[in-house]
Image (cartoon, rainbow, N blue to C red):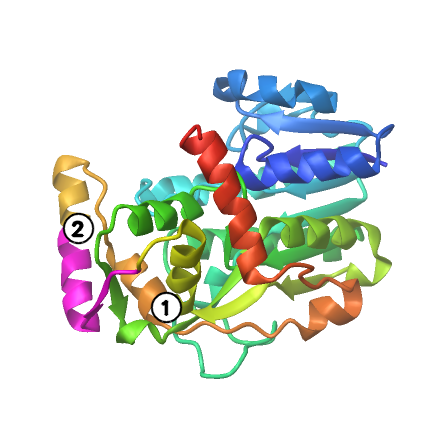
């Protein structure tokens, strides 16, 4: 097996390459990296990765990056909700198409695409949705990722290679940016707002489980042409913070926040960003994210790939907290 990973300097990419190298110690692993991220790659030297410097929005810079590569794990994307709108489409959509053009030129065989549960929007029913549920595209990250996903399957149908896509919700684990925010809120003793009294139900994916899913998508023949929803845990927002407070050994302070008032706060938060470039505590996307139930049916990924979580939520969050204490707080 010879593979190339995009987005290798990110949270998921570093976990993926670590596990692939562990399982396949003698295989060739390469990575497409932005020239500006060269220094970030120094910590990855121990995994013996061949680095290819290029940019997804420059077709010329991609030439040769997939020579003698069999499989691609395409994780790279613009994800920040406050990024300029055109950048999402330039990288997540057109950049994916550029990579696919080089994929075809090089004669590569398998393309594994990291998509997002966000393609379903926020209008979820009160039952777990499967992969046939309609998409509800929100401009920016979610729409651009779906357009990239569509390009992958269009190319696969035309040229006959194996393609699969994964749609996870929030991914957490040691090394992520989301969990430290939760721990900081708990440890600061600030009151945490609960929309709908914290009864809104969410899906969360643990990074180990996502990595397992990606590796099996590449290896299992039945994954050809398939889109997989993924989640490791389903729980309410209150359960999330109660578990975090238990792990942090502190008391949970919270208050209930009306959804409409929260949306108004989110609107002014976005205005604050536009005027002063100060990142807001809330924007309207985050309010929707916290205020809308999203439950995922995982029957397909379990039956085809055999992917299930091997840890409880408390175990997974505890592992993340231990990393946070050591690497973020230096304790």
Task: From the viewer's side, name the closer residue of 236 and 82.
Answer: 236
Q: Which residues are magenta?
A: 252-269
Residue at 52% over, 38% down: 323
The crowd level at tag 2 (other Cα within 10 Å; few <14, some 14-19, many 20+) is some
Q: Is residue 315 above or below residue 288?
A: above
Q: Position of residue 144 (x, y in %)?
A: 46, 51
Disc assigned to residue 303: none
Residue 161 position (above or below residue 195): above
Location of residue 198 (image quadrant): bottom left
Residue 122 % position (x, y)? 39, 70
**Element type where label 1 sits in the image:** helix
Q: Assess whether mark 1 and mark 2 are in contact (beta carbons under 8 angstroms).
A: no
Label at residue 269:
2
Q: Nearer the viewer, residue 28 or 190?
A: 190
Residue at the spot 45% in from the left edge and 83% down from the top edge: 126
Task: Tell me where residue 176 appears, x and y as whole percent.
Answer: 48, 42
Is residue 72 rendered magenta in the image? no
Residue ID for mark 1: 238
Eyeballing the image, is 82 above or below 235? above
Front residue (pair 271, 14): 14
Gap in Å between the C-alphas at discs 2 and 1? 23 Å
Counting every numbered tag in the picture gives: 2
Give the x, y percent position of residue 242. Answer: 39, 63
Residue 166 located left or right of residue 189: right
Residue 261 on the magenta segment: yes
């Amino acid at each position: 097996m010879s593979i190339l990973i995009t987005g290798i300097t990110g949270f998921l990419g570093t976990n993926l390459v670590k596990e692939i190298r562990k399982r396949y110690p003698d295989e060739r692993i390469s990575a497409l990296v932005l020239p500006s991220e060269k220094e970030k790659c120094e910590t990855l030297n121990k995994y013996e990765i061949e680095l290819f410097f290029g940019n997804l929005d420059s077709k010329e810079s991609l030439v040769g990056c997939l020579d003698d590569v069999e499989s691609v794990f395409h994780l790279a994307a613009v994800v920040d909700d406050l990024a300029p709108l055109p950048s999402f489409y330039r990288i997540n959509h057109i950049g994916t198409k550029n990579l696919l053009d080089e994929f075809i030129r090089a004669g590569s065989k398998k393309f594994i695409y990291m998509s997002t549960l966000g393609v379903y929007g926020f209008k979820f029913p009160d039952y777990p949705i499967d992969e046939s549920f309609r998409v509800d595209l929100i401009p920016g990250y979610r729409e651009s990722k779906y357009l990239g996903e569509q390009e992958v399957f269009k190319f696969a149908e035309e040229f006959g290679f194996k393609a699969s896509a994964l749609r996870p919700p929030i991914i957490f684990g040691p090394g992520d940016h989301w969990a430290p925010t939760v721990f900081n809120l708990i440890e600061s003793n600030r009151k945490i707002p609960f929309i709908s009294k914290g009864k809104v139900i969410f899906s969360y994916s643990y990074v180990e489980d996502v990595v397992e899913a990606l590796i099996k998508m590449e290896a299992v023949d039945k994954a050809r042409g398939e889109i997989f929803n993924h989640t490791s845990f389903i729980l309410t927002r209150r359960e999330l913070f109660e578990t975090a407070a238990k792990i942090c050994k502190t008391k949970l302070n919270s208050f209930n926040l009306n959804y409409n008032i929260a949306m108004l706060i989110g609107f002014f938060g976005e205005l604050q960003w536009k005027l002063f470039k100060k990142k807001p505590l809330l924007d309207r996307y985050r309010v929707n994210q916290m205020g809308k139930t999203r439950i995922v049916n995982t029957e397909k990924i379990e039956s085809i790939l055999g992917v299930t979580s091997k840890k409880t939520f408390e175990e997974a969050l505890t592992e993340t907290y231990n990393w946070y204490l050591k690497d973020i707080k230096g304790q």
